[in-house]
Image (cartoon, rainbow, N blue to C red):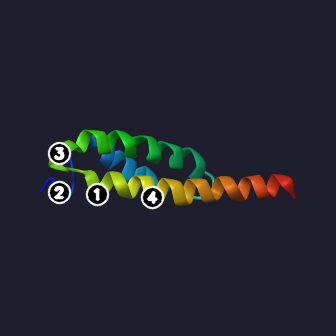
């Protein structure tokens, strides 16, 4: 069951949820940063067993895409 919901790797689980919710328009940038941070800690905590590694990688990808994308949009709006 730990490979479905990694309860022993809390940073990976939190990063996953932060990454999913970084899709929200106003909260995207801080949640994206939190997702990336938790994703890194989650990958370190996964170690050789790999428990929560998929959630951690998903957190990194979603945090980068949604958080970074909203940051880019905010910069473009400010420049206009």
Q: Are marks 2 and 1 in contact (CB under 8 Å)?
A: yes
- Which residue position is annotated with label 4? 61
Q: Are marks 2 and 4 in contact (CB under 8 Å)?
A: no
Quarter residue 3 falls in: bottom left
Looking at the rendered image, the disc whose residue lies closer to the viewer, 1 or 3, is 3
Q: Residue at position x 51%, y 47% from top?
A: 31
5 lies left or right of 79: left
The numbered mark, 1 or 3, whose residue comes first in the sequence reads 3
The numbered mark, 2 or 4, whose residue comes first in the sequence reads 2
- Which residue position is annotated with label 2? 3
Q: Residues within 10 Å of mark 3 (few under 14, many from 20)?
A: few
Q: Say which element carries label 2.
A: loop
Q: Residues within 10 Å of mark 1 (few under 14, many from 20)?
A: many
State the separation of the CA atoms marked 1 and 3: 13 Å
Q: Quadrant of the N terminus?
A: bottom left
State the separation of the CA atoms marked 2 and 1: 9 Å
- Which residue position is annotated with label 3? 48
Q: Position of residue 19 (x, y in %)?
A: 45, 54
The numbered mark, 1 or 4, whose residue comes first in the sequence reads 1
What is the number of the mark on residue 39? none
């Amino acid at each position: 069951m730990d490979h479905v919901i990694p309860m022993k790797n809390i940073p990976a689980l939190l990063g996953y949820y932060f990454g999913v919710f970084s899709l929200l328009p106003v909260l995207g940038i801080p949640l994206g940063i939190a997702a990336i941070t938790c994703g890194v800690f989650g990958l370190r905590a996964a170690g050789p067993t790999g428990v929560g590694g998929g959630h951690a990688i998903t957190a990194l990808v979603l945090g980068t895409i949604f958080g970074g994308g909203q940051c880019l949009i905010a910069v473009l709006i400010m420049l206009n």
